[in-house]
Amino acid sequence: MVDFKRVAAHYAISSLIKDYGDTEKIYSYSIRKEDYQQKKAGAAKVAVGRAAITSDITCDGETVSFCALHLGGHVFSSGIKTFPGNEAHEIMKQEIITAAEREAMDDITVLMERHFGMTTYSLMHLFREEQRKILSLVIGDIMEQFENAYRILYEHSRAPMGFIHEAGIPVQEAFRTAAAFTLNLDMKRAVSEDVLDADKIRGIIGEINKWNLSLDSVGVEFMLRRKGEGMIDKLRETPSDISLLSACYMFIDLLSTLPVNVHFWHIQNIYFKIAEAVYRELLSREKAGDGEAAKWTEAFRSLGDKLFFNTSKVLPDN
């Protein structure tokens, strides 16, 4: 069941993560900010305020006072009550803000219970979409901590572990775990760059092979496939662009050297459509002595070979 107080809790908690304007829409409710103040209390964050909530369906509404607290990670709590009047609202706000300025977290918890009662709202009371957004941010922070820890372990241990490896002694599993996490993350970042650094990618693959680690082939394949599909779609829009055609060739050539089985179905389909649409015209220009057209047809045939086409059958001779 969704009521005004749950909508208010959604608004209050999510306001600790995102900036709201004076008026906002939350599903079928309109929120008007009437008073709002936010304070940091050490690693925590607290917000207090007043908001008018109106149902866009029934036009009913309620004005509420709220307090929301984020203690870090996924720990959010909020107190909501019907607006008690200016005097009571100001007393509540000043007491909580003063406690936040003193970084007195226990006092804030006591004050929330005193002013809002024992009924509190948590991250679980948010609407599902916003709940997922906030959890994604929380997970992102956690994964960043994992990355920092694993990267330090990997970088600091790589040299002595390399000596152990060369001596024929089994490498510690803890190091392999840190190396696998770090190198797979580096690989995903490398293949997500706008311009791929082939030497960098091959270097990462070399490290993965050196330590006999598993590459996250599914995740990397998806990223590479989407990049290739984006490149060939751009080529379809401007098929005579020789620089873009060359970039497509270099990309597919790089893929052929990686231990990842990329699915070329979409890329092959678009290549075939480009061949049907413009190849004959460029070939005619080549035969008429157009040097740029000759470079294009040669590059296009080379790309077809890389995409496993029988270009002698697919591309016309005249």
Image (cartoon, rainbow, N blue to C red):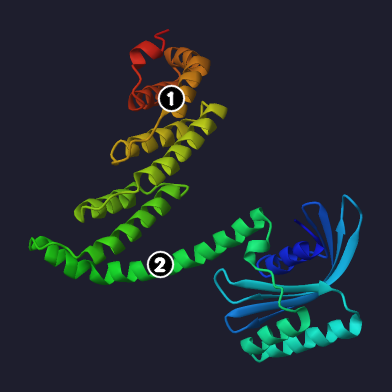
- The type of residue carrying mark 1 is Gln
Tell me what residue is drawn at x 47 percent, y 47 percent. 194
Q: Which quarter of the figure has residue 55?
A: bottom right
Q: Amino acid at mark 2?
A: Phe
What residue lies at 30% left-to-right and 53% top-to-bottom?
204
Q: Is residue 278 above or below residue 155?
A: above
For residue 268, the mark is 1
In what quadrant of the picture does the N terminus appear? bottom right
Q: Position of residue 77 (x, y in %)?
A: 66, 73
Q: Nearer the viewer, mark 2 or mark 1?
A: 2
Residue 218 lies left or right of residue 40; in this view the side is left
Left or right position of 317 against 88 = left
| Residue 18, x across and y down, in percent | 68, 65
Residue ID for mark 2: 146
Instruction: Classify the position of the C terminus by image quarter.
Output: top left
Q: Earlier in the sequence, mark 2 or mark 1?
A: 2
Camera-nearest residue between 156 and 113: 113
The residue drawn where x is 60% and y is 62% is 134
* Residue closest to the eye, 116 or 186: 116
Residue 239: give x, y in percent of width and height.
Answer: 52, 26
Residue 20: tell me if it is visible: no
Q: 10 Å neighbourhood of mark 1: few (<14), some, or many (≥20)?
A: some
